[in-house]
Image (tube, rainbow, N blue to C red):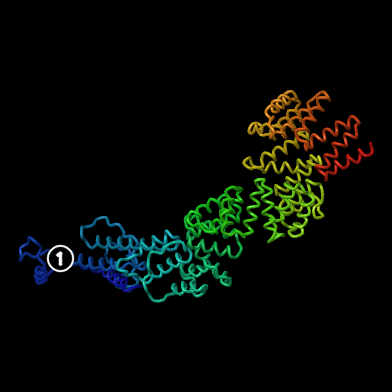
Amino acid sequence: MTTATKTISRILACLPLIALLVLSGCASKPSDNDSAEIGKAEVSPGTAANTPVPEKEILIQTAQKTQAEKTEIIAETDSPETPAISDTENGKDSAAENADSAEPEQTALSAEAEPVETQKSGSLETRAVNLSTLLSTVRKTDESVLKDAHTGSPDSIRRAVESLSKQEGNYTQEEIDILVSMTAFMNYAWKTETVSWSVPQSEETDYTAIVDSVRRGLYDTNGGSGDFFRQVLPSLILCSSSPQTNYYDDAMFMLNLAVKDNPDSVIANYLLGLLYRRTGDVDNSFLYIKKAYEGSATTFEIQYEYCRLLMEKKQFSEAYNLALQLLRKKNTADILKLCAESAFNAGNMDTAEQYVAQILLAEPENIAYIMMRAQILFSRGEYLKASSLLDVYAKTDRTGLDYLLLRARVQIQWNKNNNAAAATMQTALSLYPENTDVLLLAAELAVETDTRIGGFDAATLIERVLEKDSSNLKALQLKVNRAVQNSNWEEAFASSQIISERIEKEDSEYMSISLTHATICLNLGMISEADTIINELYGSYPDNEDVQLAYINLLIATGKKAQALSLINSLLQGAQNATAAKKRSILFYQRSRLQPDATEELNDLRSSLIANPRNQDTLFALYRYYFARLDYRKAQYYLKQLIALDSGNSEYLRLNAELDQHL
């Protein structure tokens, strides 16, 4: 307890006694000598010199003077240690008994004075109430400062410092300790913030010793857990790049204590989030950094850590929006990379390329961003440029996961070299046998080529993915595609049903997945379900070519051939330009199915093949047309074209072997 506080306590302890003396004096009549002395003491203005002043007024004035002196002392004392006035029964005997029986240091000051029903202006009772109210206000201010200091965000620290600032610089030691702690928070945790105040000189304390340890890159284990600042200050070392890890257990214990007692503390939640990230616990790190972000969403350091964690949690769109806010504050390589990676993973390729270009301009040998640019170019269909960048990347790394995956995709999409792609994926499987992306691409290639990749068939590769994640949509889609390829409609329906129940309308693949499911339903004779899906899609996307063709298939399946023929003819009239060749090919093929005359059927099939010589549906229809008429040579001619386009198709190979027997 400070000297000033002790002085106040002693004065307040005497207050009830003074009030008792006043009341006693009023109750008993003074002697003549006393009256004479009192009469000489003071003459009020406008009163004859020989007129005695009323005794009660003199006593009140004396009490007021004493009270004013006490108020002055209190005004000079601004310490959170100031006790509160204890409630009294109108300042009567119970207070006097407490004053007699207790030490001055033990006198408690109540936070709120008890209401007084009848008060006389200037009375001791009124002054006692005013004094209690004043001390109550001082205490509330102190609590507010401490709360802001414990919150520890840049804004709350500035509020606390402003409340503590004094023109005379007359700080208590406790106030200096709070200033030391808050200044350390700003200097080590919130490094981008400006410290616009100075800390008064004082003796070395536990707090200054802890801060000095942090400055030297050491965790102070001697601080103890006595208060919030001792719990939190040592962990400021987490804001540096110190390689030490031997303090993690101590820091975890202390920071959890701090957060338990101060759940809304920005600084404590932030440091605990950093600690969990250091230990590899991303989920808990995200939990506490998010709590700090909610308490101080504009603090740069918190935004940066939260953005990195959003990336790890695959919340890429939110991460990109936050990265943009960071970039407006600080245009650095790290922030540019956050913008590039978040935009890329969110699928904003054009936006990502702008940031990648800036990064490569500053770091032309950065192979990670050379790879990212190659992936962006591939996503646009610029395969030649993507391939050139892959060659640049390969000079440094020919076994990287991203390199092997992208190289295989280029070989499939651009080079049309499935054998080369299979060899690339075999290497990838040997190096990354449990990687889901490798297994999925190998399975996709195995489904398309109907061959083994790295010794595994498509079904095995798909099942290896589903064993790790039974709900993997990509694996389920491949399983559906493989079943459709083999005309195994029941198996296809089982997996397609799972996908259809989970896919959302907002998903980019919703339309293609729904159309595949409708096609399966049509082949299983589930006309009603197919009708619901296709009509819904046709109502929403009437100009989409895939939806139009599915609608034609539905019309044919439901016997509405005239309506289907009318729609086909209408669509053919609008597909006369060169870019619509594939669409014309499909429409002619569909019309051939509706022709009652064999000659008209053949004419439509030939028109379809002229528009697109690689239309596999048309080639297979021509094979069947000539096979039905026993023209095996022409039938084999079209079947061999199919085999050239899909050399791994076992069904085509089987049919060709049968034709050989007829020739």
In the rendered view, does 460 fall on the left or right side of 156? right
Instruction: Give the crowd class for mark 1: few <14, some 14-19, many >=20 residues within 10 Å.
Output: some
In the rendered view, does 67 fall on the left or right side of 417? left
In the rendered view, does 250 fall on the left or right side of 199? right
Q: Residue at x 82, y 49 (%)?
A: 451
Q: Image quadrant of residue 392?
A: bottom right
Q: Residue furthest bottom?
A: 203
Quick one: 536 or 150, which is closer to the camera?
A: 536
Vertical placement of 294 versus 635: above or below? below
Where residue 592 appears, x then y in whole percent? 79, 28
Q: Which residue is mark 1?
A: 58
State the quadrant of the C terminus. Answer: top right
Q: Image quadrant of residue 90?
A: bottom left
In the rendered view, does 22 fall on the left or right side of 423? left
Vertical placement of 510 versus 206: above or below? above
Where residue 209 appears, x then y in whole percent? 45, 75
The amino acid type of the residue labelled 1 equals Ile
Q: Image quadrant of residue 455?
A: bottom right
Q: Secondary structure at mark 1?
A: helix
Quick one: 627 or 323, which is closer to the camera?
A: 627
Where residue 338 appears, x then y in whole percent? 56, 56
Q: Is residue 102 visible?
A: no
